[in-house]
Amino acid sequence: MDTANWDHTTDFLVVGSGGGGMTGAITAADAGADVLVVEKTEQYGGTTSMSGGVIWVPNNHLMKAAGIDDSEAEAWQYLERVTAGEVSEERLRAYIEKAPEMLLALERSGDVKFAAAVTYMDYYPEFPGGKPGGRSLEPAPFSARKLDGREPQQRASHQGKIMKISMTAGEGRKLVNFTWRSWLVLARLMLRYYLDIPSRLRGLPDNRMTFGRSLGAQLRAALARRDIPLWLNTSFQELVLEQGVVVGAVVQRGQERLRIRARRGVLLAAGGFDHNEALRRKHHPAGWQPGWAAGNPGNTGDAITAGTDVGAALEFMHCAWWTPTYLMPDGHAEALIAGKSMPGSIFVNALGERFANEAAPYEDLVKAQFAAHSDSSSTVPCYMVVDATYRNKYPIGPVGPGKAMPDELIPGELKRAGFLRRADTLEELAGLLGIDEAGLSRTVARFNQFAVDGKDPDFGRGDSLHDRYYSDPSVAPNPSLAPLQKAPFYAIQIQAGDLGTKGGLKTDANGAVLDQQDAIIPGLYAAGNCSGAVMGNSYPGAGSTIGPAMTFAWLAAQHAMSDQVQ
């Protein structure tokens, strides 16, 4: 391709404005580079802003400040076990060593602030090197006013449209149980929200930003402080090669097709192929359906396609950050994270039978859905079944607990869509769902005895510390097990969804993209879900998506700015 006649020149071009992309841009700018960030959609933040915003960083300074010990040796022991030898030692060790440095650097620069989730355990805390808390870090609340009017341009989660009041993960956990203390937490949150008179009069979202909304905002504010341009509505089209080196890219900005020269490299941080139906049907399990993904609708695999066009290798394309999802009346998917492990609920297939530990890490639960699926006993989709006790005490997706949102107050759009099915008997409920009546009755009877005994010999629900994080400590002997015995009974349909895909361009320990012979493609870097996950086909803990995206973008920017690549 002709490499003359550039329309724009920069040192470092970043494609994508999620946590990884913005971290890479900030890092390159601090090294003295001229940086440009391009974003395909009309909103910045990507899946990061839609998410919980948590990052998983072993051996970090915040957990140590909270009195939790960790070491590189323990982190290696844990990740080696969880990733099962599918990820190179070089990349794993790079993450273990450099993620804490990335976190510390961003905190010291004042760009981001996090807090250690001291009781949010690794997803396999019983494994060697696993920890009961502290490796997952939550972004500190952030004021939307610090964005100087840029907040409307940020991508928000669908859940944010349902829950107008922002909350931290700790506050959210207290609300899940909805005890009398939950009312106090809710009252405090509502008071803060409604006393913000300027925002309420202007019809603005909660000024107190939390979760991924906070992380995306903090990084966007950091871009603004450095005068790093961010072009919205600018789609990445292709990479430009010159004698085997990536020297720029072609983008579509509005009606203009622009050739951008990138003197020091291009960082692809444009998300996965969540909404690319052709790629998903090619690489993912039979039974997967479009619309079940809860990630950014702009994630269509553009960076992955462009990378392969210049010879990049791919890895982990069969993997995703799986999670159960449910469909809202407008058709979009929401992740079900907490409710699946609360006592008094089960997941059943078309035969009315359980097929997995419902409280297991969400990626494992969806893998079990696919593994157990067959024509005769469909688990894709399946159903979550609860009784009146559960309905009264805990939320069910967008439906608040009955004590706060009785059936007659469920929003009309949810009722019209049949989101929450209700019946006076289990047999009647099974008929509404089209599943085996006798099978559901037998399953509930068996499960109820497990709840009384406090042990689940079929699937071990509640045995792990992980299973008990989102549970009810007032329920004994197992806070994740309670019988389903009080009518009426309720159910929602559960899809085999995901938070995003995790397969993509193969990279080295610096985020440099590799070709089919594992040689570096000069000038090309990738981070986040458009690259093959450093976690492989596993999910070590909350934040295993954004933590690596930010770390390898940080490393990529440093590598691109180093003398060795001039």
Image (tube, grey):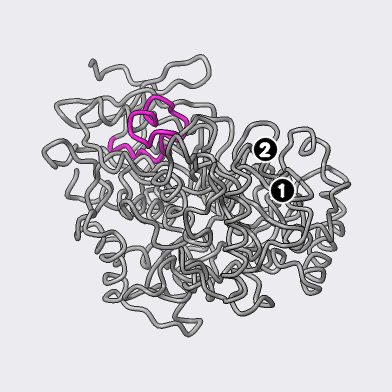
Classify 49 as above or below 178: above
Classify 67 as above or below 161: below
Tags 1 and 2 in contact by the CB under 8 Å rule?
yes
Quarter occupied by the N terminus: top left
**Foreground residue, 166 or 241?**
166
Q: Secondary structure at mark 2?
A: loop
The spot of residue 520 in percent (x, y) is 17, 41
Q: Secondary structure at mark 1?
A: loop
The residue stretch that appears in magenta: 263-287
Q: Closer to the N terminus: mark 1 or mark 2? A: 2
Corner quadrant of residue 174: bottom right
Q: Is residue 254 magenta?
A: no
Classify 524 as above or below 32: above
Q: Is residue 154 visible?
A: no
The spot of residue 235 in percent (x, y) is 46, 25
Q: Residues within 10 Å of mark 1 (few under 14, many from 20)?
A: some
**Foreground residue, 204 or 253?**
204
Residue at point 65%, 42% (across, down): 158
The spot of residue 200 in percent (x, y) is 85, 48
**Foreground residue, 81 or 198?**
81
**Foreground residue, 269 or 288?**
288
Would you name the residue on which mark 2 appears? 328
The spot of residue 410 in percent (x, y) is 82, 45
Classify 534 as above or below 114: above
Q: Residues within 10 Å of mark 2 (few under 14, many from 20)?
A: some
From mark 1 to mark 2, how far is it between C-alphas?
A: 9 Å
